[in-house]
């Protein structure tokens, strides 16, 4: 039998330390969309864990409506609802099932191992998407896996002539290893 989401260890709400059985290092929370879910799947249970994240713990969501007669926008904040959670889950499920991954369990945040220079799930997502020009979800998953493995295969900073604070560069949102570009 292959990998399942239940292979990923779970920590309680608020916990950020990786549990025993996962690789030591820095972890960031994967973004909550299909690409983030495929990143967690590609990382696998030794480089990713989940933390409980019930609906009640989620921040409020911004709701904007427009007054038809005046065009005035009215902004209000609403509690995150089960309907909102179900909409997000359905979109993620559709995307990742097309890539061959099983449905993502709801009620969790997914923490993914990253190099020290990755500061957030958004930066991780941009760095992986930069090399991903595929449209079919199965190709996207393969590209994410390749880019993620490549990202983790380097020790940062590289020994090179550039300052240690510049282990990589970003071109049009694409994280590029200077060693791979011939610069280190």
Image (tube, rainbow, N blue to C red):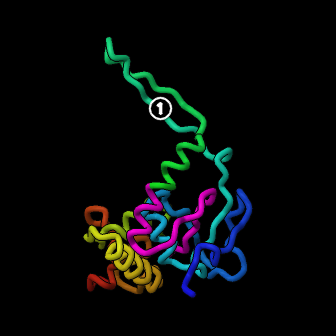
User: Which image quarter: residue 8?
Assistant: bottom right
In this view, the residue farthest toward the top is: 69
Res 67 quadrant in image: top left
Image location (x, y in percent) of residue 115: 50, 75
- Residue for point 36% across, 79% down: 142
Q: Is residue 165 above or below residue 120?
A: below
The crowd level at tag 1 (other Cα within 10 Å; few <14, some 14-19, many 20+) is few
Looking at the image, is 88 positioned above or below residue 154? above
Residue 10 drawn at (x, y percent): 69, 69
Magenta part of the chain:
91-116
Q: Is residue 71 left or right of residue 92?
A: left
Q: Is residue 39 magenta?
A: no
Let me know if residue 107 is in the magenta part. yes
Residue depicted at x 60% and y 77%: 25
Label 1 sits on residue: 63
Does residue 155 appear in the picture of this structure?
A: yes
The spot of residue 32 in percent (x, y) is 49, 57
Front residue of this view, candidates 157 and 113 = 113
Decide if residue 181 is on the left or right side of residue 41. left
Look at 48% across and 59% down and name the residue there. Answer: 31
Left or right: 32 as drawn, with respect to 174: right
Mark 1, secondary structure of its residue = strand
Q: Quadrant of the C terminus?
A: bottom left
Residue 82 figure quarter: top right
* Figure label count: 1
Q: Quadrant of the N terminus?
A: bottom right
């Amino acid at each position: 039998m292959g990998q399942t989401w239940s292979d990923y260890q779970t920590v309680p709400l608020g916990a950020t330390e990786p549990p025993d059985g996962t690789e030591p290092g820095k972890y960031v929370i994967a973004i909550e969309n299909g690409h983030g879910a495929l990143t967690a799947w590609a990382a696998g249970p030794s480089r990713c864990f989940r933390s409980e994240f019930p609906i009640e713990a989620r921040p409020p969501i911004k709701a904007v409506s427009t007054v038809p007669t005046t065009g005035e926008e009215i902004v209000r904040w609403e509690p995150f609802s089960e309907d909102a959670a179900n909409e997000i889950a359905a979109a993620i499920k559709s995307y990742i099932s097309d890539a061959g991954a099983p449905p993502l369990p709801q009620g969790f945040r997914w923490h993914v191992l990253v190099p020290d220079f990755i500061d957030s799930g958004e930066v991780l997502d941009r760095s992986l998407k930069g090399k991903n020009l595929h449209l079919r979800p199965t190709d996207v998953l393969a590209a994410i896996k390749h880019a993620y493995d490549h990202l983790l295969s380097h020790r940062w900073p590289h020994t090179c002539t550039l300052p240690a604070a510049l282990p990589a560069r970003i071109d049009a949102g694409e994280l590029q290893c200077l060693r791979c570009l011939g610069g280190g």
